[in-house]
């Protein structure tokens, strides 16, 4: 007992000796409490028993819940299947065109997620390029089937990244050992590869499923009368001004998300098989037989072509006068989106601010949690990562609830949008920083302290320069994600403070396809420019999106 | 010895990574039930050779034969060359029992048979009681045994071991290597073993193949390799040697070599006069005498010298002695605690312990 207490005292002595760092810690903690925890608590607190009774009794809410679950199950299954195929082909098979396949898979990750929904309408809608113009059909993509298609395409890259990481972490010597003991390819795949990958793949599937469960953009664009919880919550606020009911619906979304998050932290994280091997001399996997290789190649090609056609159609739409009616080319759509509206400019400006904030907080938080001990370290880590699984709708509503009165009256300001963006993207920046920190030997820091530098000085003079690539990577990543985020900011935008992602949705709802696609196209170009800049500045030192 | 059946045969095999030949024209025969060790410095191609035998890589040139049958195109799962990996490669999602049973299950043995065999080999290797555990709950030594058990239980034609002891601590390594050798002899299993530790190779092998830069530079019994190294590299890599170079002086029936100032007598060797010779002398072959132990100066290869440095290593002492313009390493075994020498000393190099490595006529 006494020993524990003494150890704790020893752990926190640096707080007294390093007052500046202590102040930084307090600032980070305050930021997380106010902008992560408070909105969540507000959302949990507003619905009364009455609202919960309504939720249970009203058919529409039950239906939305069922729809959400159905869509999550369907789309997760298909996205994971496609993602697995893609990952297995790119990691294990010796096929041509890998860089191209990787680049194509990157597109859905750096564009607004509802772009796939938008393109689905342009391709298969009532006036769709494929259905109407080429096939002369009258086809209605609105509803669960169109949404399923769009969500599969929007989320398979995430599945691919997860599975690829898992497959790469399996030591080739394990599969070779199985071959060596007499197992054929299929037996090795069944008894070694799949069981080893299973925990990691399950974890990736859960992440994908909670993101699909809470997704807002595509159901809004493509759901039609197929309402899910996120769109139902939006309607409750925008249509009926019933914030309490919306908060209740978000809470329903939060439960599985939080469940996953806790499971990931305390159970799945430990089960994943980390294969430690001391001999890096490249033992490679056995080459797959040609039939399998070409089958995988064919599968990837089909997926890549579908994804490519999605983005092609966005690009074409941006230059087309009136989709489905007047196919002549024009620059007029850009004239409107680029010069008459400030949405794109706002997106970039707010995105840059959010990225700077998120990357800074993430780097400092990572340093504190990885290198310092203090009471509440676990909580700080938890709060920094929590936004990863928070439904965007919940963050948006939480911000509305938390910051609409003094002392934190931010409604209608740019600050609230920037904060929402920063919170949404904080976990990724944090993860990047943690990974980079793990690559820096603690002894480097000790050497600096040993030579007489204070802890803060060591951080500034030694750690920051070493972390700068991670910082730049985190900055670009959070920027790209910020300009694309929709579900949280849609509740926060006001006429003078509109951002592109929200405006695209508005334009699409009113059928202004040309302007919607032009804006989406511009947003994608900005994101790609950001990534290009990153490559230019830091080269291959930071890996984003598996490029 | 000529009646021995040849079990594994490598005939001029080459393996390139890009243009770099990691294994270069290697030829080796492994008789049945023999323990053959590939020994060489890091990066010389030992692991690659072993992986070629196991079929993990395809040879670019040459032929691999097992039981006289060409196996170049036989996939690894059909070769019956069970391997113990350097990192053990235990399947982390299986228990010890399941790990050992893996190869038997693949071969569709009945459950009863699997249990019986796994229990047998677990007993043999002292693994009873660990069967239900998961590999990461075992100590390094236990993991090593599970890897060995997993390979042995399938009764492979050939057993391949890639530095199986390198992940164990020094004390334990000695014990396990003795166990491996005893087990191999008991089972009569043809074995190819890889190590970069010369002491280990000498202790454990029937035959040692010394490798350098992808080639085999000498094959022989541990005794041959140690006492009759074929090159300066082998003499230096296996144990340590003093090297001196000089010119051969013809002298009726005995050969002498003039090594810059002093002349060493080699006895009858029949080397051509005037040739340049490279000589090697093991440090333990040289007799070291204190100034008071003077013997008659007429004796051959007797040099006066000075102790430059010495290092006490428990059972022996290594001296560095400056004598005749060269520094000689000399090992002296201490049968009992005794005084360490310093200052003026004398060396005697027995002529039969001088090994001629190279001799080139001008
Ligand atoms: N997959 C590979 N691609 C390219 N070069 C390789 C590959 N595997 C091995 N090499 C090279 O071939 C050479 C021999 O490698 P090998 O692993 O056989 O050495 P080794 O004798 O086992 O060394 P060690 O004692 O360090 O294990 C090395 O120079 C190595 O760099
Ligand atoms: Mg090796």
Image (cartoon, helix red, strand yellow):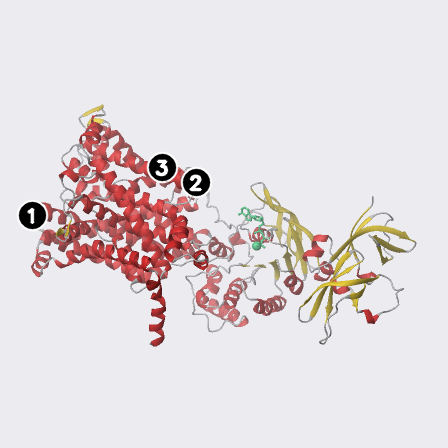
Residue at left 61%, top 59%? B193
Mark 3 / mark 2, whichever is N-terminal: 2
Query: Where's residue A42, x and y in %?
Result: 15, 56
Q: Mark 3 — on which chain does it sit?
A: A
Which image quadrant is residue A494 in?
top left
Would residue A462 be found to the left or right of residue A47 on screen? Answer: right
Which image quadrant is residue B300 in?
bottom right
The residue that mark 1 highlights is A240
Mark 3 / mark 1, whichever is N-terminal: 1
Residue closest to the far right: B252
Would residue A182 be found to the left or right of residue A81 on screen? Answer: right
Query: Where's residue A134, x and y in %?
Result: 23, 28
Q: Mark 2 — on which chain does it sit?
A: A
The residue that mark 2 highlights is A95
Mark 1 / mark 2, whichever is N-terminal: 2
The answer as to whether the residues below labels 3 and 2 share one chain is yes
SS category of the residue bearing label 2: loop
The residue that mark 3 highlights is A532
- Does residue A349 appear in this view? yes
């Amino acid at each position: 007992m006494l020993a524990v207490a003494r150890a704790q005292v020893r752990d926190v002595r640096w707080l007294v000796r390093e007052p500046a760092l202590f102040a930084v810690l307090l600032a980070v903690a305050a930021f997380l409490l106010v902008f992560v925890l408070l909105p969540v608590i507000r959302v949990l607190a507003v619905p009364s028993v009455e609202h919960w009774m309504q939720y249970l009794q009203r058919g529409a809410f039950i239906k939305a819940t069922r729809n959400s679950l159905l869509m999550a199950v369907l789309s997760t299954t298909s996205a994971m299947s496609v993602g697995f195929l893609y990952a297995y082909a790119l990691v294990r098979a010796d096929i041509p065109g890998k860089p191209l396949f990787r680049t194509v898979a990157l597109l859905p990750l750096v564009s607004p997620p509802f772009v796939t929904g938008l393109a689905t309408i342009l391709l298969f809608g009532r006036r769709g390029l494929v259905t109407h113009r080429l096939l002369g059909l009258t086809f209605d993509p609105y509803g669960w089937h169109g949404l399923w298609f769009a969500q599969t395409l929007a989320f398979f890259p995430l599945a691919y990244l997860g599975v690829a990481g898992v497959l790469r972490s399996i030591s080739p010597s394990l599969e070779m050992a199985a071959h060596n003991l007499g197992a054929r390819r299929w037996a090795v795949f069944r008894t070694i590869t799949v069981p080893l990958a299973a925990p990691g793949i399950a974890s990736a599937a859960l992440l994908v499923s909670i993101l699909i469960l809470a997704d807002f953009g595509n159901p809004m664009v493509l759901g039609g009368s197929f309402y899910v919880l996120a769109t139902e919550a939006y309607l409750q606020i925008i249509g009926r001004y019933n914030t309490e009911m919306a908060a209740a619906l978000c809470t329903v979304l939060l439960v599985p998300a939080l469940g996953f998050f806790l499971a990931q932290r305390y159970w799945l994280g430990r089960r994943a098989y980390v294969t430690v091997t001391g001999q890096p001399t490249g033992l490679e996997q056995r080459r797959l037989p040609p039939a399998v290789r070409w089958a995988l190649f064919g599968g990837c090609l089909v997926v890549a072509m579908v994804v490519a056609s999605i983005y092609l159609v966005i690009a074409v739409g941006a230059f087309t006068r009136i989709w489905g009616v007047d196919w002549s080319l024009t620059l007029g759509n850009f004239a409107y989106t680029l010069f008459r509206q400030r949405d794109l400019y706002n997106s970039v400006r707010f995105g840059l601010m959010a990225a700077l904030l998120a990357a800074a907080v993430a780097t400092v938080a990572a340093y504190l949690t990885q290198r310092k001990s203090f009471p509440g370290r676990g909580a700080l880590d938890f709060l920094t990562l929590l936004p990863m699984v928070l439904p965007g709708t919940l963050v948006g509503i939480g911000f509305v609830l938390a910051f609409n009165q003094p002392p934190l009256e931010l409604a209608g300001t740019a600050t609230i949008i920037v904060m929402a963006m920063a919170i949404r993207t904080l976990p990724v920046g944090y993860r990047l920083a943690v990974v980079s920190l793990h690559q820096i030997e603690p002894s480097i820091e000790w050497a600096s302290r040993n030579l007489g530098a204070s802890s803060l000085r060591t951080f500034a003079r030694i750690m920051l320069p070493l972390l700068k690539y991670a910082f730049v990577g985190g900055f670009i990543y959070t920027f790209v994600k910020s300009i694309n985020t929709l579900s949280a900011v849609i509740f926060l935008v006001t006429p003078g403070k509109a951002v592109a992602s929200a405006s695209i949705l508005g334009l699409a709802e009113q059928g202004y396809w040309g302007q919607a696609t032009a804006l989406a196209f511009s947003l994608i170009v900005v994101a790609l420019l950001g990534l290009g800049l990153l490559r230019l500045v830091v080269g291959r030192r930071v890996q984003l999106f598996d490029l | 010895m000529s009646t021995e059946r040849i079990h594994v045969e490598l005939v001029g095999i080459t393996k390139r990574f890009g243009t770099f030949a990691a294994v270069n024209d290697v030829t080796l025969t492994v008789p049945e039930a023999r323990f053959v060790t590939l020994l060489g410095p890091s990066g010389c191609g030992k692991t690659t050779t072993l992986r070629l035998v196991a079929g993990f890589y395809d040879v670019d040139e040459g032929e691999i034969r097992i039981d006289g049958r060409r196996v170049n195109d036989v996939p690894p799962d059909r070769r019956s060359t069970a391997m113990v990996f350097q990192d053990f490669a235990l399947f982390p999602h299986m228990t010890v029992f399941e790990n050992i049973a893996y190869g038997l299950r693949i071969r569709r043995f009945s459950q009863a048979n699997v249990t019986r065999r796994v229990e047998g080999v677990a007993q043999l290797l002292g693994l009873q009681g660990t069967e239900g555990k998961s590999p990461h709950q075992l100590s390094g030594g236990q993991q090593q045994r599970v890897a060995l058990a997993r390979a042995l239980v399938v009764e492979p034609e050939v057993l391949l071991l890639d530095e199986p002891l390198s992940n164990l601590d020094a004390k334990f390594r000695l014990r396990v290597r003795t166990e491996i050798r005893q087990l191999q002899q008991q089972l009569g299993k043809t074995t190819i073993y890889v190590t970069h530790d010369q002491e280990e190779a000498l202790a454990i092998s029937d035959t040692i193949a010394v490798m350098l830069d992808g080639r085999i530079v000498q094959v022989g019994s541990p005794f041959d390799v140690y006492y009759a190294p074929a090159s300066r590299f082998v003499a230096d890599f296996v144990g340590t040697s003093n090297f001196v170079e000089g010119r051969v002086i013809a002298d009726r029936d005995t050969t002498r070599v003039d090594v810059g100032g002093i002349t060493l007598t080699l006895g009858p060797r029949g080397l051509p006069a005037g040739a340049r010779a490279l000589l090697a002398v093991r440090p333990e072959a040289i007799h070291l005498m204190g100034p008071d132990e003077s013997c008659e100066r007429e004796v051959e290869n007797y040099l006066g010298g000075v102790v430059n440095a010495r290092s006490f290593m428990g059972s022996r002492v290594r001296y560095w002695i400056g004598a005749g313009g060269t520094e000689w390493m000399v090992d002296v075994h201490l049968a009992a605690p005794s005084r360490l020498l310093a200052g003026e000393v004398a060396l005697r190099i027995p002529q039969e312990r001088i090994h001629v490595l190279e001799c080139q006529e001008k």
